[in-house]
C-alpha cells in the first residue's frame, strides 16, 4: 500500500453567524464537522454528496485555503498548523486546486501565457524566457498547441479549452496533490469525457494524487479509487470504489446511487432500486439532533433522532456512520429496511436524491 500523503483527523470548520453593528454571534455554521480521512499517494479519493454537504469547504481546508477550526491536517507526515512562512510556502507549492467554473477562475484581462505562468512568477521560478518555455510545455501536456493558444484571452476559448488552461496552471509548480472541485460539471457531456481522460493521463505522467469533488456518482465510478460520501459536514460512508458500489451500506449512499441513470442491464445490476429522499438537505446552521440524516431517512430506528452515530468498520477499509451497524443496537444493517420502490413505479418524473 502506498504511503499517506494527506491525513485529516477530526477536522472541523465552523463559521460564526453574526448580526448587528457589533457583530454579535447568534449561531454557527458547521460546514465540516469532525472529518477523519486519509488520501494515499497516487490515488484518487472522491468526495460526493448533495450541494451543502461541505465538500468544497473540506477541500479548501485540506489545502490551506481556509484554516480549520480544530483538528489535525498532515501533508506527507508534516502537520500544517504552526508552520513558519517558509515551510508553509514550500508545502503550498505541492498542493493546487482546479475550480468548477473555468470562466470565473481565469483572469479575463490576461493572456493564456500569463495565466499559466503566474504561479511560476509568484514563486520567482526561472527567467521570463524559461517561464515561457515551461508554459508552452504545459499547454502541450493538456493538448493545447502553444502557437495557437499562448496569446489568446479566456473569452476566445471554449469551456473545455478554458478548463485545460486551468489544469495547466495547476500543474505549473509540479504539485503532488491536486483538488478537482467539480472540474467537469460546467462542461457539455461530450467534453466531460475528454477532460476526465486527460486528468487520468496526467495523473499517470506526473504521479499525482487527486481529491475529486463531485455530485455525479456515475462519473466518480470511472475515476475514483476510494469514495467518501458526505452529508452535512460529516463523512457518513467511506470505502474502496468497487466495494461502495457492490455493498452501499449507509441509507444516504443507497439513495444517491439509486438516482444514477442507467442505460443497460449491466449498469442496473450495480444500482439499487430508486429510493426517493423526502425534503431538501437542511442548512448547516440548523443541523438536526442525533444523526443529521434521520429526518430524511427511510430506514431510521429508535435512537436515530438523539444519538450521533460513530463510524463502524464493516469490512476492511469500509466505514459507515449509522446506528444500523452499531453493535449496541444489534447491528441489523439495511436488510429489510430498503423500500421496495422500482424504477418503473417511480417513472421518469419521480423524486430523485436532489444532488446538485
Image: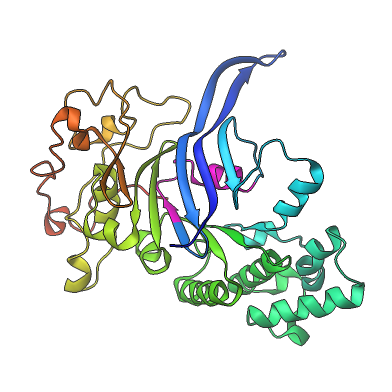
Q: Which residues are magenta?
A: 46-63
Q: Measuring 73% from the left and 40% from the top, which residue is drawn there?
A: 83
Residue 289 % position (x, y): 34, 22
- Where residue 130 sits in the image (x, y, percent)? 87, 77
Residue shown at 28%/20% (left/top)?
306
Who is closer to the viewer here, 211 or 264?
211
Say left or right for 111 vs 174. right
Quadrant of residue 242 in the image? bottom left
Regarding residue 227, the answer to whether it shows in the image is yes
Residue 117 at what x, y percent from top left? 80, 68
Pinpoint residue 268: horizontal percent, then vertical percent: 19, 66
- Of 84 and 53, which appears nearest the observer? 84
Say if 290 sits above or below 125 in the image: above
**Front-most of residues 247 and 114:** 247
Residue for point 23% across, 36% down: 297
Task: Tell me which corner region of the image, top left, top right, bottom left or bottom right, holds residue 156.
Answer: bottom right
Q: Does the image show residue 150?
A: no
What number of labels is visible?
A: 0
Locate residue 158 relative to residue 346 in the image: left or right: right
Verify whether residue 54 appears in magenta: yes
Q: Is residue 94 above or below residue 112?
A: above
Give residue 237's quadrant in the image: top left
Q: Is residue 28 above or below residue 200?
A: above
Of the 4 image quadrants, the one containing the N terminus is bottom left
Magenta segment includes 329: no
Q: Is residue 316 above or below residue 150?
A: above
119 and 203: which is toward the camera:
203
The colour scheme is: rainbow
Amino acid at each position: 500500500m502506498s504511503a499517506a500523503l494527506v491525513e485529516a483527523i477530526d477536522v472541523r470548520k465552523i463559521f460564526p453567524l453574526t448580526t448587528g453593528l457589533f457583530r454579535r454571534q447568534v449561531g454557527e455554521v458547521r460546514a465540516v464537522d469532525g472529518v477523519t480521512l486519509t488520501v494515499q499517494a497516487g490515488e484518487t479519493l472522491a468526495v460526493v454528496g448533495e450541494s451543502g454537504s461541505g465538500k468544497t469547504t473540506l477541500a479548501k481546508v485540506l489545502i490551506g485555503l481556509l484554516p480549520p477550526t480544530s483538528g489535525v491536517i498532515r501533508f506527507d507526515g508534516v502537520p500544517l498548523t504552526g508552520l513558519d512562512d517558509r515551510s508553509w510556502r514550500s508545502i503550498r507549492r505541492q498542493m493546487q486546486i482546479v475550480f468548477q467554473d473555468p470562466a470565473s477562475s481565469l483572469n479575463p484581462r490576461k493572456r493564456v501565457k500569463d495565466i499559466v505562468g503566474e504561479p511560476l512568477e509568484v514563486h520567482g521560478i526561472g527567467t521570463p524566457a524559461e517561464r515561457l518555455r515551461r508554459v508552452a510545455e504545459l499547454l502541450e501536456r493538456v493538448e493545447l498547441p502553444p502557437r495557437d493558444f499562448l496569446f489568446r484571452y479566456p473569452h476566445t476559448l471554449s469551456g473545455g479549452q478554458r478548463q485545460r488552461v486551468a489544469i495547466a496552471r495547476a500543474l505549473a509548480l509540479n504539485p503532488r496533490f491536486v483538488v478537482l472541485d467539480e472540474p467537469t460539471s460546467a462542461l457539455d457531456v461530450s467534453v466531460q469525457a475528454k477532460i476526465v481522460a486527460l486528468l487520468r493521463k496526467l495523473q499517470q505522467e506526473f504521479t499525482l494524487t487527486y481529491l475529486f469533488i463531485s455530485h455525479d456518482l456515475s462519473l466518480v465510478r470511472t475515476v475514483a479509487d476510494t469514495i467518501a460520501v458526505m452529508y452535512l459536514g460529516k463523512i457518513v460512508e467511506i470505502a474502496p470504489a468497487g466495494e461502495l458500489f457492490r455493498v452501499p451500506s449507509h441509507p444516504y449512499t443507497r439513495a444517491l446511487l439509486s438516482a444514477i441513470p442507467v442505460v443497460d442491464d449491466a449498469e442496473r445490476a450495480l444500482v439499487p432500486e430508486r429510493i426517493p429522499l423526502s425534503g431538501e438537505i437542511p442548512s448547516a446552521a440548523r443541523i438536526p439532533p442525533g444523526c443529521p440524516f434521520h429526518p430524511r431517512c427511510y430506514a431510521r430506528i429508535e435512537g436515530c433522532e438523539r444519538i450521533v452515530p460513530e463510524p463502524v468498520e464493516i469490512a476492511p477499509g469500509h466505514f459507515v456512520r449509522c446506528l444500523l451497524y452499531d453493535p449496541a443496537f444489534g447491528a441489523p444493517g439495511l436488510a429489510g429496511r430498503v423500500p421496495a420502490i422500482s424504477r418503473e413505479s417511480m417513472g421518469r418524473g419521480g423524486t430523485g436524491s436532489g444532488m446538485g
